[in-house]
Amino acid sequence: MNRRTKPEVLAPAGNLRGLKTAVDFGADAVYCGGKAFGMRSAPKNLTLEDFEEGSRYAHERGARVYVTCNILPRNAEVKAMREYIGQLKDTGVDALIVTDIGILMEARRIAPELELHVSTQAGVTNWGAANALYELGARRVVLAREMDMQAVRDIRANIPADMDVECFVHGSMCMAFSGRCLISNYLTGRDGNHGECAQPCRWKYSLVEEKRPGQVFPIEETAEGTYLFNSQDMCMMEHLDELIDSGATSLKIEGRAKSAYYIAAITNAYRTAVDEYMVQRGFESRDGEILRPFHDRVVVPGQPAPAWLLDERAAAADVDAAVVADADPSVPTAVADGDAPVDAVLRNADAAFSGVPDLVSEDPAEPTDATASEGADAADTAVVADLVATPSAATCACGRTDATQSDGCCGGHDDAASSDGCCGRGDGSCRRADADAAGVAESTAPSAGDDPLAPVESDESGWIHARVVPAPKVTLPDWLKEEPYKVAHRDYSTGFYYPEQKVVQNTDRSAYFRSWLIVGEVLDWTADEGGRVTIMSRNKIEAGQEIEFLLPGRAPLAYTVPGGAFRDENGEPVDAINNPAHVFSFPCSEPVPHNAAIRSRTKRPTLKAA
């Protein structure tokens, strides 16, 4: 049965408190490890009793719990893992995340009622592997982080509808393929494939010549040396629409070793972003009412059009659906050279980790005249946030849908510095930094004249890639786009999803950026005295300080702390809150929920040790 009624926000937890926090801030599911056999040994992780309590808590609020059993076990560990799986099945958890095929088969035998998810450690990179795992009982694959966006589309198009596709969207990345790394084991004896990674990829490396012992030579990416393996973090916040359109079922946030605040802030952000997607794509109303069934936008050239596409075409063209059906989109039609719209994701397919050099624009239609070169610097460093599914040949790059020219242009402009920000290209691959994003966002669904199902040229192997039917860009409020920068983070990237802008290493530092810090957590709020909040302090709070309350499902509440009204836990007045882990209160007219995090900007941004 197809359970994909909505994209799943999957949050991490390293302990019971983290699990409850993730659920409170909107996670559809939480993944966590037990005291053994998980890929994170640094967090406290959960006991069997914690799993029971956590599962009850999650189920009462409509969420699910997944347990990691994804180490690569040695011979001596197989028996113990069997016993552990037998214990887990009675705790109320919903699924097991496994890597080893032997453990998958044992779990299927011992706990047939539990769903089986195949970990990213298994390195699933193609639909053949996903289908084989489905036959073995898996109902979800966590794709290798090295997959590009086109690979997500292709896998989604060639696996059963009830098999979930889980993709990472946020958090730390490993320089080794799907986390299969031996550097930690080799240098420290701590096995990364057993959850004990010492993260030597974050260390700073230099060279020493054998005849000059003690003389260190930096690897000259900077004057100070280089963090050779130190990957950037991932943040797909502004590209969720394209990932969901491409067939991602579950959106995974990395961070089981992170704090409860990190879990709350990032889970809340992605929850809100997914809700925006559902509303702007027309699947739900603002109050959560289901308007039509959720679906991705993946289609396969030459195959019959899905019902939702026929409906969209009929609505966009204002014609009867039966007329559209008569066109029989399953019948191959010739596509003249240059008529098919250019899709940057499709064009750069299979280049994410295949040894292909870093990509640059290869579009022969790139404007070269003086007017078109305006803003070229911005185009050369194209912000991946502007990458959206390709408009059709009947939709101009500016977003207008009244295309009249042979190249798909609307004819309303003929130079690269048009008042509407369009570069004049009608192939949909415009990424001008000054383009009118609002115009694109307001464009309609594809018209009846489009046919993403028409045959396309295969590669040398005969493989034909799946395609995504274009749709308007989902717009997010500014506060939401700022949330990833209010937790400790390294430089962000979009991972390998876009080969033309792949993740790279931070060569000058391994530390995190931190510009916000937690100053307290709400214990209680009362309407007495015009409103008063009681908190557990974490850092100093003084009169006039600007703070934010992090609230589930909405923008943070900005608040200026009034002076002259602080009290300690005994109700005695104090000048400021300056003792961590103590109870204080201060006036607050706005109701705030229990456990809401309170944060404040640091006086100056800092680098936090990794």
Image (cartoon, rainbow, N blue to C red):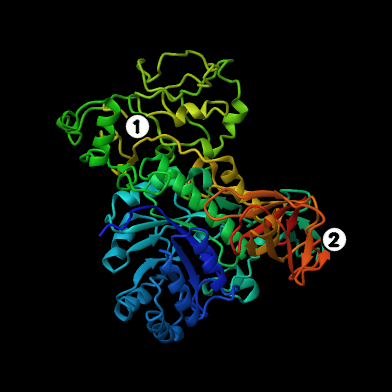
Query: Any mark on residue 458, and which?
Result: none
**What secondary structure is marked by label 2?**
loop
Examine the image and state in which quarter residue 96 appears: bottom left
Quarter of the figure with the C terminus = bottom right
Is there any visible trace of residue 498 in the rendered image?
no
Q: Is residue 342 above or below residue 263?
A: above
Residue 366 at what x, y percent from top left? 50, 24
Query: Any mark on residue 445, and which?
Result: 1
Work out which residue is located at the far front of the displayed protein and give it.
Answer: 529
Quarter of the figure with the N terminus = bottom left
Q: Nearer the viewer, mark 2 or mark 1?
A: 2
Q: Nearer the viewer, residue 324 or 588?
A: 588
Q: Residues within 10 Å of mark 1 (few under 14, many from 20)?
A: many
Q: Is residue 540 left or right of residue 299?
A: right
Q: Is residue 364 above or below residue 570?
A: above
Query: Mark 2–mark 1 contact, CB under 8 Å?
Result: no
Is there any visible trace of residue 532 in the rendered image?
yes
The residue to which callout 2 is attached is: 575
Residue 368 at what x, y percent from top left? 54, 19
Identified by mark 2, the residue type is Asp
Report the number of discs.
2
Q: Is residue 408 above or below residue 431?
A: above
Q: Nearer the viewer, residue 426 or 4?
A: 4
Residue 193 at what x, y percent from top left? 52, 72
Residue 53 at what x, y percent from top left? 47, 77
- In three-dimensional space, the C-alpha distance between marks 2 and 1, rounded to whole angstroms, equals 59 Å
**What secondary structure is marked by label 1?**
loop
**Mark 1 or mark 2, which is nearer the start of the sequence?**
1
Residue in the picture at 56% in, 52% down: 234
